[in-house]
């Protein structure tokens, strides 16, 4: 692939990161547990990893999977894979063997970077992954599985020369005895795995320059976009070194994009390395590091944090803003934060893996919510965002018609390995313009803002995790005592939505809901397992045999009636 062939070519993510590291080398970039990395150190370690990957035969454009909890090495690995000219693949650490097999196989991953405890699940599926030829193991205190024949991550980095080669080492030069690194480009790929309409995750394939513009570039309103990597570096040098506590998992878009956008502004990312969410420990960390902003995922995180702050209101004097991604904060939770500190800024970001960051909602409480549904929020969106009618024509501001929220311009190339789903989610209109459909429906207000009404499918958003009912239903139906099933969301004060299953049993069968959950737990990630099970005499279906979601919503609880397909 020729480089610097277009204005986007200089905007590779690794090249931008290296330019920022050159501009602010001694500034702290990352705090994760006991580790504190300057921009110089982060650049050096990610370059060492890149050299190791190239030396082991990873070629430009090949995919390298990362299976890890939030920790410094996740960020190093992501940047190092990019610097090697390869493509990082985010893997959900909650996945069981079947789900891991799908992502590692579907992504054609040739290498895997994994924590010891998580890699144990991979060992059983290695025979099904003929392309996977190299494994790097991260120490996490558990016993290492020697049968994986993996290379220790720290040993791999230590074996490489320390020279980073300046801004991105883009000429491919290196010190004696080290593997040369390829040139990188904004035309190179960025791959983000997310839930798909069939239940199994799909890889959303972007160009790096496009994901930078659509999700990562951070600028004030009215400020022009960066024209060169030097503009990005100069902006970072001028920026106030703000500190953000990123609580969203880095293996999801919200956590990953927030962390990357902060780093490309020369700011400081603070990660909680705890394996479980404890609000007291999170706030102790935020207080100790003097964080200014907390990025979190909906009420599931925001509610317990606010409640703890109300018991110790003197904590976190530097904390001035809270940003929620993945799912919006409800009015009740926003009220808890206002009770702690009246002037705290609360913002909900709207976007998705297929669309990037589209806009945000920051209006005062009482003006931003449709009273009948806390999910109906008014978002200020960029000029590339529209509400489309059934013919893919943008609706005019003030139109009462409900349409599909979509983005044009800087959008993904499509789904990796899935042309059918690509055609469905990224259609062309009559003028040949490509759109990325978000899956959400909304209306266009007179002022141009977009009122989010909800998803157009029956996807369940539980604490920011997407659960597709078809996948859960397939697992439930595999139980010999189950005759039929329908899975829907029901309201949950903590999670936003919970996975609820309506189950009819086979004639003469008996089954306890605990046994049904146990059946699911070995086949599904924990967040997909139904939290509520209703046993019914018969799962109702429509005249054409489709599941009757209106009926299911009435059984599962008020608040899901709008999920009619």
Image (cartoon, helix red, strand yellow):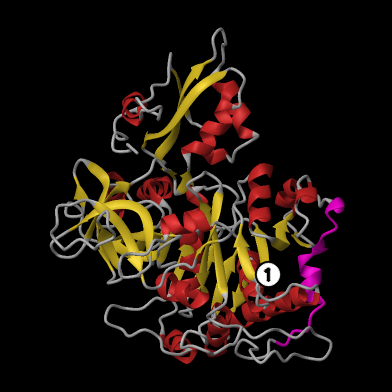
Label 1 packing within 10 angstroms: few (<14), some (14-19), many (20+): some
User: Hey, which residue is sitting farthest top in the picture?
Assistant: 508
What residue sits 83% from the left and 54% below the top?
A: 148
What residue sits 70% from the left and 50% below the top?
A: 118
Give the left or right position of residue 472, taking residue 241 as reference.
right
Quadrant location of the N terminus?
bottom right
Q: Please name whichever residue, 305 or 385, is drawn nearer the observer in this view of the structure.
A: 385
Q: Please name whichever residue, 321 or 430, is drawn nearer the observer in this view of the structure.
A: 430
Quadrant location of the C terminus?
top left
Up-down: is 196 above or below 346?
A: above
Residue 449 location (% of width, % of height): 21, 62
Give yes or no for residue 514 being in the magenta stretch: no
Q: Quadrant of residue 271?
A: bottom right
- Read off the residue under disc 1: 62
Say what secondary structure mark 1 lies in.
loop
Give the left or right position of residue 198, taking residue 399 as reference.
right
Give the left or right position of residue 82, taking residue 205 as reference.
right
Up-down: is 124 above or below 50?
A: above
Residue 127 location (% of width, % of height): 80, 49
Q: Please name whichever residue, 321 or 367, is drawn nearer the observer in this view of the structure.
A: 367
What residue sits 53% from the left and 81% below the top?
A: 186
Residue 131 location (% of width, % of height): 76, 60
Give the left or right position of residue 173, taking residue 529 as reference.
right
Give yes or no for residue 157 being in the magenta stretch: yes
Q: Which residues are magenta?
A: 146-163
């Amino acid at each position: 692939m020729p480089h610097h062939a277009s204005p986007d070519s200089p905007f590779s993510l690794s090249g931008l990161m290296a330019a920022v590291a050159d501009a602010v080398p001694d500034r702290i970039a990352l705090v994760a547990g006991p580790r504190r990395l300057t921009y110089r150190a982060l650049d050096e370690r990610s370059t060492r990893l890149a050299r190791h990957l190239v030396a082991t035969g990873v070629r430009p454009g090949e995919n390298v999977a990362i299976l890890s909890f939030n920790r410094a090495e996740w960020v190093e690995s992501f940047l190092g894979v990019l610097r090697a000219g390869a493509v990082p693949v985010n893997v959900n650490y909650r996945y069981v063997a079947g789900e891991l097999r799908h992502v590692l196989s579907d992504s054609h991953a040739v290498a895997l970077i994994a924590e010891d405890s998580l890699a144990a699940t991979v060992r059983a599926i290695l025979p099904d992954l003929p392309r996977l030829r190299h494994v790097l193991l991260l120490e996490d205190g558990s016993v290492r599985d020697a049968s994986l024949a993996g290379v220790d991550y720290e040993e791999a980095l230590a074996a490489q020369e320390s020279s980073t080669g300046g801004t991105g080492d883009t000429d491919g030069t290196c010190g004696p005895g080290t593997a040369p690194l390829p040139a990188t480009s904004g035309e190179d790929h960025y791959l983000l795995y997310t839930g798909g309409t069939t239940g199994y995750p799909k890889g959303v394939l972007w160009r790096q320059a496009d994901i930078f513009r659509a999700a990562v570039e951070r600028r004030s309103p009215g400020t022009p976009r960066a024209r060169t990597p030097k503009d990005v570096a100069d902006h970072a040098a001028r920026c106030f070194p703000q500190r953000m506590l990123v609580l969203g998992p880095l293996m999801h878009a919200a956590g990953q994009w927030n962390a990357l956008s902060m780093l490309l502004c020369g700011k400081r990312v603070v990660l909680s390395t705890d394996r479980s969410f404890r609000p007291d420990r999170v706030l102790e960390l935020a207080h100790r590091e003097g964080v200014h902003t907390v990025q979190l995922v909906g009420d599931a995180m925001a509610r317990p944090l606010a409640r703890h702050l109300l018991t110790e209101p003197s904590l976190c004097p530097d904390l001035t803003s809270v940003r929620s991604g993945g799912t919006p904060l409800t009015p009740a939770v926003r009220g808890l934060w206002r009770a702690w500190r009246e002037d705290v800024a609360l913002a909900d970001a709207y976007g998705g893996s297929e669309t990037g960051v589209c806009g945000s909602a920051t209006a005062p409480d009482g003006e931003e919510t449709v009273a009948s549904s806390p999910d109906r929020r008014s978002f200020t969106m960029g000029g590339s965002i529209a509400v489309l009618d059934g013919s893919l024509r943008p609706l005019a501001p003030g139109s009462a018609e409900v349409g599909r929220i979509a983005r044009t311009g800087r959008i993904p190339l499509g789904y990796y390995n899935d042309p059918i789903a690509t055609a469905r989610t990224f259609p062309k209109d009559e003028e040949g313009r490509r759109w990325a459909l978000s899956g959400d429906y909304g209306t266009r207000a007179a002022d141009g803002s977009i009122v989010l009404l909800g998803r157009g499918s029956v996807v369940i958003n539980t604490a920011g995790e997407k659960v597709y009912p078809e996948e859960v239903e397939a697992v439930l139906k595999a139980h010999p005592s189950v005759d039929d099933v329908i899975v829907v969301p029901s309201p949950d004060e903590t999670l936003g939505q919970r996975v609820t299953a309506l189950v009819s049993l086979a004639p003469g069968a008996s089954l306890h809901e605990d046994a049904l959950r146990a059946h699911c737990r070995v086949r599904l990630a924990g967040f997909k397992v139904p939290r509520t099970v209703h046993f019914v005499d018969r799962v109702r279906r429509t005249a054409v045999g489709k599941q009757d979601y209106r009926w299911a919503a009435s059984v599962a609880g008020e608040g899901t009636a709008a999920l009619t397909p």
